[in-house]
Image (cartoon, rainbow, N blue to C red):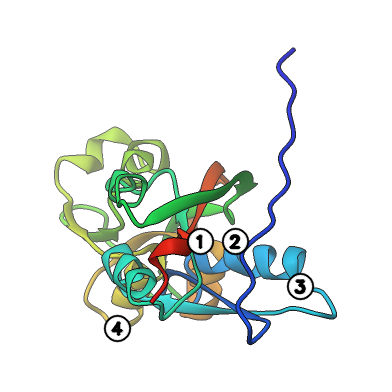
Amino acid sequence: MLKFSIEFKPPIPPSRNLIVGTLGPSGSSSDYVSNYLVNQLKTEELTLSTQLFDSFIDVKEALLQDKVDHALVPHAYELINEFYMEPSFELGFIFIYPTPVYGLAKKKNTEVVLEGCRVATHPAPLPLLSKLLPSQYLAQMQVDLSPSTSDAAIQVNQGLADLAITNEKAAEAYDLEFISIYGNIRMSWSIFHKKLAHHV
């Protein structure tokens, strides 16, 4: 059996307040996990807060510019290598924490015709679509990629898409309901911070 443990000791700024940057808007899986992280790390001597961004590219820029102290990034993010390969970044910690329940959601009190409907989804959970619907509908659907699971939910809420692959937190926040449920996803996450020599 492989067994090991590591302790996360984040660099603490003079303000004693750590800002964790991750993907928003509110209701995203990254937002959900950042709240767990904040609750795990807060102490009487240290306060933590989360700042949400429209993309992980924006999260990276915020960390480069010292606008946040840490970046929380899931390993499902297709360009996570850009964080690992950034010379001024250091990997602070890796942990496993499940996402909220994922599923296919529609706006409440609406009827959806599956043939030819528009589905909004972040690229990462797109493979779930074939698990959420019978195969005969898939070829007839139009898939629109969105920046996050919560953005996909917002698109359905605003009538820009008929369905969204999203999580239960975003579905609740934007008045959607599941028509098909997959479950949560056991996800690994990286926390990055700047190397001490690279702080401005």
- Callout 3: few (<14), some (14-19), or many (20+) C-alpha neighbours within 10 Å? some
Real-space CA distance between mark 4 and mark 2, rounded to the nearest whole angstrom:
26 Å
Question: For the residues carrying marks 1 and 2, which lies nearer the camera in this image?
Answer: 2
Question: For the residues carrying marks 4 and 1, which lies nearer the camera in this image?
Answer: 1
Q: Label 4, on which residue?
A: 158
Residue 191, percent from left and from top: 52, 55
Quick check: marks 1 and 2 in contact, CB under 8 Å? yes
- Label 1 sits on what residue type? Ser
- Callout 1: few (<14), some (14-19), or many (20+) C-alpha neighbours within 10 Å? many
Res. 111 in view: no
Real-space CA distance between mark 2 and mark 3, rounded to the nearest whole angstrom:
14 Å
Question: For the residues carrying marks 3 and 4, which lies nearer the camera in this image?
Answer: 3
Residue at the spot 68% in from the left edge and 52% down from the top edge: 8
For this orientation, the residue located farthest to the top is 1
Identify which residue, 165 or 56, lies in the foreground: 56
Residue 42, numbered circle: 3
N-terminal of the two: label 1 or label 3?
A: 1
Residue 135, percent from left and from top: 28, 34
Real-space CA distance between mark 4 and mark 1, rounded to the nearest whole angstrom:
20 Å
N-terminal of the two: label 2 or label 3?
A: 2
Left or right of 125 in this view: 17 = right
Q: Where is 85 relative to 12, above or below?
A: above
Residue at the spot 59% in from the left edge and 61% down from the top edge: 33
Real-space CA distance between mark 3 and mark 4, rounded to the nearest whole angstrom:
36 Å
Residue 33, numbered circle: 2
Residue 29, numbered circle: 1
Identify which residue, 88 or 189, lies in the foreground: 88
- Label 4 sits on what residue type? Gln
Question: For the residues carrying marks 2 and 3, which lies nearer the camera in this image?
Answer: 3
Residue 100, percent from left and from top: 59, 56
